[in-house]
Image (cartoon, rainbow, N blue to C red):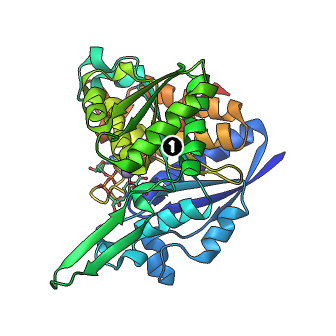
Amino acid sequence: AQQYRITLLPGDGIGPEIMAVSVDVLKVVGQQLNLEFDFQSALIGGAAIDATGEPLPQETLETCRNSDAVLLAAIGGYKWDTLPRHLRPETGLLGLRSGLELFANLRPAKILPQLVDASSLKREVVEGIDIMVVRELTGGVYFGQPKGIFATESGEKRGVNTMAYTESEIDRIAKVGFETAQKRGKKLCSVDKANVLDVSQLWRDRVTQLSAEYSDVELSHMYVDNAAMQLVRWPKQFDTILTSNLFGDILSDAAAMLTGSIGMLPSASLGASGPGVYEPVHGSAPDIAGQDKANPIAQVLSAAMMLRYGLNQPEAGDRIEQAVMQVLDQGYRTGDIMSEGNTLVGCRAMGDALIQALEKAQ
Ligand code: NAD
Ligand code: IPM
Ligand code: MN
């Protein structure tokens, strides 16, 4: 059998619940296609803080580095929200992304036909949506220096973050944007705030310059405020969106809702080489954690992305995606995607339905 070392990072909140479902699903496709997964669980986020005092233990980073791919659920929760910045769960996640140099985050927002009525927008607005957000992930205002809360001369405090990109940081993510668009609808919309921000002007200049190498891709530019509006007004105008770290964070949550629920959206965080991290777009959903209410599909589809992009096992990825389509056809819905006439299920029952669908397809 083909063997793979997979690091599992269940994290906090609903993380362990949705991870358990994904591991069961992976085991079943693994058996079916003769893939052997060597799963190694490691600590991150609040769970790591509680066990070791830090959100990203060195051991976790090493385990991730030594694996073929990393499957991450989510981190964070009220319990850790008042800790100093360097001890916060989110700092652990940022450390993982920068530690593995995962500068490109691919966030596909594609509506499944079964969920058209689960979206808060009208059918004709969302039907057929297929957008890919290419988000820069290791730069921008998340990482720029200086940062911190400093005392001023007048004695008050001043909070500082710095939005910065070098040309090479822009170029490498722009290349991913152009290459992604080439494989899709050949339309790339670069989103920035060049009317106000110098960092965005440099971004726009570099992207425009690079576009000469991708003559088959139609490039457009849009300011981020307009992009937020256009995503809700007429999302079908977008094919591939290229944007910076913070803008991509915000726009991908908005794009998520076009597809019915953030509980449906997977992502892949990739570097130039080495293992990628596959993670849902949503967070640890502390409001529903521990209640068997979470939608595991974003996590399960992240596992499918891992098989497809990280392990070059597209057949296994296809099987998982088909199982998702099938349980939705059967009318199974978690609370976040529930609509009239369907069957409300919990996280675990959704997992059981996925496994049945996989076994039946065999
Ligand atoms: P969130 O995405 O966790 O939750 C937003 C809303 O969506 C909540 O009402 C939640 O119940 C719902 N939701 C999210 N995922 C769901 C799912 N799979 N099924 C059903 N409903 C789902 O965002 P938040 O509330 O702003 O953040 C909560 C915590 O998660 C914070 O600590 C935040 O920092 C963290 N967070 C982590 C990640 C990550 O690990 N990648 C991403 C975003 C937020
Ligand atoms: C995400 C999250 C993270 C981010 C947080 C938890 C650090 O919101 O993955 O979208 O802002 O990148
Ligand atoms: Mn986010």
**Above or below 342: residue 261:** below
Is 275 situated left or right of 241 in this image? Answer: right
Q: Residue at x 34, y 49 (%)?
A: 293
Disc 1: CA contacts within 10 A as few (<14), some (14-19) or many (>=20): many
Is 309 situated left or right of 72 in this image? Answer: right
**Above or below 284: residue 145:** below
The x, y position of residue 36, in whole percent, is 76, 49
Q: Quadrant of the N terminus?
A: top right
Pick whichever, 218 or 95, lies toward us.
218
Pick whichever, 340 or 2, lies toward us.
2
Q: Quadrant of the C terminus?
A: top right
The x, y position of residue 185, in whole percent, is 53, 19
The x, y position of residue 338, in whole percent, is 29, 33
Is 22 situated left or right of 246 in this image? Answer: right
Residue labelled with disc 1: 267
Q: Residue at x 40, y 42 (%)?
A: 201
SS at mark 1 in the image: loop
Determine if residue 282 is in view: no
Amino acid type at mark 1: Ser
Q: Residue furthest right?
A: 1
The x, y position of residue 53, in whole percent, is 47, 83
Determine if residue 70 is in view: yes
**Above or below 325: residue 27:** below
Q: Residue at x 39, y 36 (%)?
A: 191
Tally of numbered tags? 1
Q: Residue at x 68, y 67 (%)?
A: 63
Pick whichever, 338 or 41, lies toward us.
41
| Quadrant in the picture for residue 112 | top left
Disc 1 under 8 Å from ligand 2? The reply is yes
